[in-house]
Image: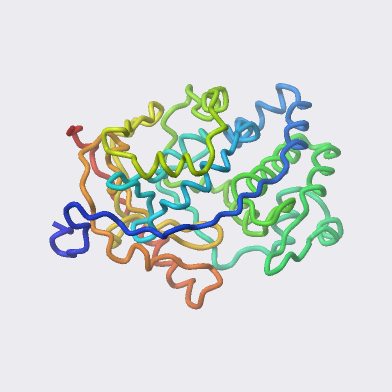
């Protein structure tokens, strides 16, 4: 019905026009010191970490295939916020991300949103790491248009902190800042501390689907080829056909699928630096459900940065929409 009303869905046999070529510079933080600290911890401290922050430590051993990453960038379709390989669409789902982290301290349908009135960067850091105002002030740095704290300052604190819980908190903050949301190499950005400060509110949009199975643990343990060059990946993706794709996420078997929030025909997501739109109905095959192309009117226009004019009004609209989340029963699989 929405498709007929909006008239903005893809036409039959339509193939999206992507950019001719995009060059992506892939840089990573050195995680060796984080790994060494984790290896030194005893089982009691590790269990305290898992209890509060889930499977984050497995990210320390995650191998990033830079050639694959650069090749994937060529197939990102900004009009529909997904990867488009000919007639095959693929996009990571909210449910997958949450299931991967497998953290039990979550709450259904509580989306992260940047609060209008938040403590200063100084106060947030003092609260998270448990150090004095003088100590924190001396270590805050300005890098371009961002304020941040160097990883080496947090490293020294983790090694010397007498409070096990605070030691775990600072280690988790470092993983969020260096691996999940890196912006400046060797530093943790202020925006990450805002997200981290709200983790106690258990803000996440979906439940964890498995308490006993760890996807990240299995992925890290699986051997993968890393000798495929970028041009080879490009050729693979360019020739990808629907019959070559098997949708498989054994840890993810939701009975109901989040597909709409409030008056939006899709799902608006508020991140730590801005907002994007997400159309889960575009990838129902990944849920082993009947596939069709949803209306995506306004999807691209919903993107904005927290530095844009009038972002607070837009952020409030999106946050309020999450009070009206809508889910649909998983549809029968149709080959």
- Identify whether 117 is placed above or below 188: below
Can you tell which quarter of the image residue 80 is in? bottom left
132 is higher (above) or lower (below) than 231: below
User: Percent position (x, y) of residue 251?
Assistant: 41, 28
Furthest-bottom residue in view? 309
**Foreground of the two, 24 or 275:** 24
Up/down of 120 relative to 261, above or below? below
Q: Quadrant of the C terminus?
A: top left
Q: In the rendered view of the protein, which quadrant contains the N terminus?
A: bottom left
Residue 92, picture quadrant: top left
Residue 326 placement (x, y as % from top left):
28, 50
Give percent across and percent down for residue 194: 62, 57
Q: Could you say which is closer to the camera, residue 173 or residue 280?
A: 280
Q: How is the image coloured?
A: rainbow
**Identity of the residue drawn at 40% across and 47% down:** 109
Q: Position of residue 196 (x, y in %)?
A: 62, 50
Question: What's the residue at 35%, 49% (across, down)?
Answer: 84
Residue 229, quarter of picture: top right
Q: Nearer the viewer, residue 93 or 267?
A: 93
The number of numbered badges drawn on the structure is 0
Q: Is residue 317 visible?
A: yes
47 with respect to 95 (left or right): right
Residue 104: in sight, yes or no?
Answer: no
Residue at image position (61%, 64%) is 118
In depth, the one of 166 and 282 nearer the eye is: 282
């Amino acid at each position: 019905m929405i498709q007929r009303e909006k008239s903005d869905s893809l036409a039959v046999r339509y193939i999206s026009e992507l950019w001719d070529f995009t060059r992506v510079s892939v840089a990573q933080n050195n995680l060796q010191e984080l790994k060494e600290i984790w290896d030194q911890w005893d089982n009691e401290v590790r269990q305290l970490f898992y209890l509060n922050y889930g499977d984050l430590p497995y990210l320390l051993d995650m191998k990033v295939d830079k050639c694959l990453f650069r090749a994937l960038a060529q197939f990102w379709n900004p009009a529909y916020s997904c990867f488009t390989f000919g007639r095959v669409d693929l996009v990571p789902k909210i449910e997958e991300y949450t299931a991967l982290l497998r953290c039990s301290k979550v709450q259904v349908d509580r989306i992260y949103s940047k609060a209008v009135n938040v403590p200063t960067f100084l106060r947030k850091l003092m609260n998270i790491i448990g150090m004095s105002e003088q100590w924190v002030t001396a270590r805050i740095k300005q890098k371009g248009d961002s304020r941040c704290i160097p990883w080496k300052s947090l490293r020294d604190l983790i090694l010397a902190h007498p409070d096990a819980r605070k030691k775990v908190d600072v280690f988790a903050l470092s993983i969020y800042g260096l691996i999940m949301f890196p912006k400046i190499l060797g530093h943790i950005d202020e925006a990450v501390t805002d997200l981290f400060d709200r983790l106690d509110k258990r803000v996440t949009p979906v439940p964890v689907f498995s308490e006993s199975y760890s996807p990240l643990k299995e992925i890290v343990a699986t051997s993968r080829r890393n000798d495929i060059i970028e041009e080879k990946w490009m050729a693979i993706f360019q020739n990808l056909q629907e019959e070559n794709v098997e949708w498989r996420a054994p840890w993810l078997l939701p009975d109901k699928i989040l597909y709409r929030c409030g008056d939006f025909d899709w799902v608006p997501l508020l991140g730590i630096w801005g907002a994007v739109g997400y159309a889960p109905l575009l990838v129902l095959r990944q849920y082993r459900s009947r596939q069709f192309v949803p209306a995506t009117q306004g999807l691209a226009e919903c993107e904005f940065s927290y530095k844009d004019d009038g972002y607070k009004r837009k952020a409030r609209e999106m946050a309020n929409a999450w009070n009206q989340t809508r889910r649909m029963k998983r549809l029968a699989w149709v080959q």
